[in-house]
Image (cartoon, grey):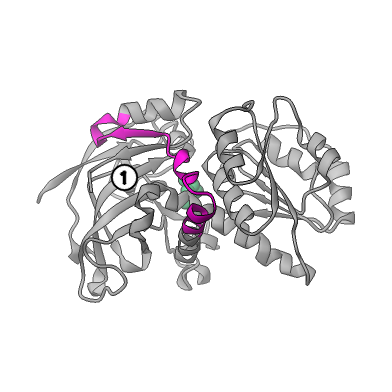
Amino acid sequence: MPKMKAVAVRPGQPHSVHLAELDKPTLDQVPNGRGVLVKVLKVGVDATDREINDALYGNAPPGYDFLVLGHESFGVVEAVGPNVRHVRPGDYVTCTVRRPGGSLFDRIGRSDITSEETYYERGINLLHGFLTEYYVDDAEFVVKMPKGLKHLHVLAEPMSCAAKAVQQAYEAQRRLQVWDPQLAFVTGAGQIGLLTTLILRLRGLEVYTFARGEAPNLKAEIVEGMGAHYVSTAKTSLKDVMARVGRPDLVVEATGSSAIAFEAMEVLGLNGVEVWTSITGGRKSVQVPSDMINLQWVLGNKLLLGSVNANRRHFESGIADLALGEVMYPGVLAKILTNPVRGIENYREMMRLLVEDKHALKVFVEVAEG
Ligand code: BGC
Ligand code: ZN
């Protein structure tokens, strides 16, 4: 059996990132001729990978004492089973992260809203990830990327999460019968905050995107490149901006800080919706003005919505918005892809950038050329 290298952790053991070895997968591991064998080209890493290496969460697949990392994948199809129609060898693809469990939602292609406690996510929980040389998966989970978006590669997965978050907000707001949002606040200018900013700009909203750093900096350049407003919270608070431009119809929270998730609740407008997307693996706890928030929330018919993960429809609409983004704001999206790391063997440098480099907006591993 040919072997291949992979970057893995030992779940439960902090800072255990290491090089592991796996058997090269084969098409026949997927039933019904639905297998797609993908050669991995690039894999993005994010705070989730960092927190898994900190042993805050993450579990190995049954029968293994390690978990291969990597859930933001970009690769090229090498071979497909006889019953695969939508991709063929040579196509660029990305892949969804979550795999179905047993709930009704899982059975209708909505594992992203599974009603089971246990979720199965490649590179995160109970399934090996993509930070290796090849993977095989069911065609259902493999999503084609147009050749023209090859240069945005690993952004497809974070984009899918941003796409889901925004779509969920719009769907939930159908409770109002009419909802025509004009103003949005996005808290956080990491990949999710920036990609959410893009999606909202493409829908014509005025967007204020908040992050700590003072402009000029790269995040501000990207936000302004999309026609949105960058606000440094070092100088200006959410409330300051609210006092100037009014209460937002929509808040998307993507800072990774639960304190800010609650703080943002104090600025949301009447009938508004706030979407939480941050995975906060820590144990932080803060005091909040609960009477005030409760009162505003009830009197204002406001909605708080959590959103995680994404299914293939969200990937597809996210990819369409990446393409539209390239037309509307040419060259801006590629600026997110700041820190390439060459080769799987350089996994230590990958983790170092992720942990230490405050300017590393997006770290990704270049696994192979192609
Ligand atoms: C991933 C999602 C995943 C979530 C929770 C995020 O980093 O991008 O796909 O569902 O973590 O594990
Ligand atoms: Zn992620």
Residue 16 location, x and y as percent?
34, 29
Which amino acid lies under the numbered mark 1 shown in the image of this protein? Lys
Farthest-out residue, top? 356
Would residue 60 be counted in the magenta stretch?
no
- Whether residue 296 is visible here, answered yes or no, is yes
Where 48 falls versus 75 (above or below)? Answer: above
**Is disc 1 surrounded by few (<14), some (14 to 19) or many (20+) residues within 10 Å?**
many
Would residue 336 be counted in the magenta stretch?
yes
Give the left or right position of residue 11, taking residue 369 as reference: right
Closer-to-camera residue (19/165): 165
Disc 1, SS: strand
Residue 194 location, x and y as percent?
56, 44
Residue 65 location, x and y as percent?
30, 40
Residue 91 location, x and y as percent?
27, 61
What residue appears at the point 64 percent right and 29 percent down from the top-left corner?
212
The span picked out in magenta is 321-347
Residue 244 location, quadrant: top right
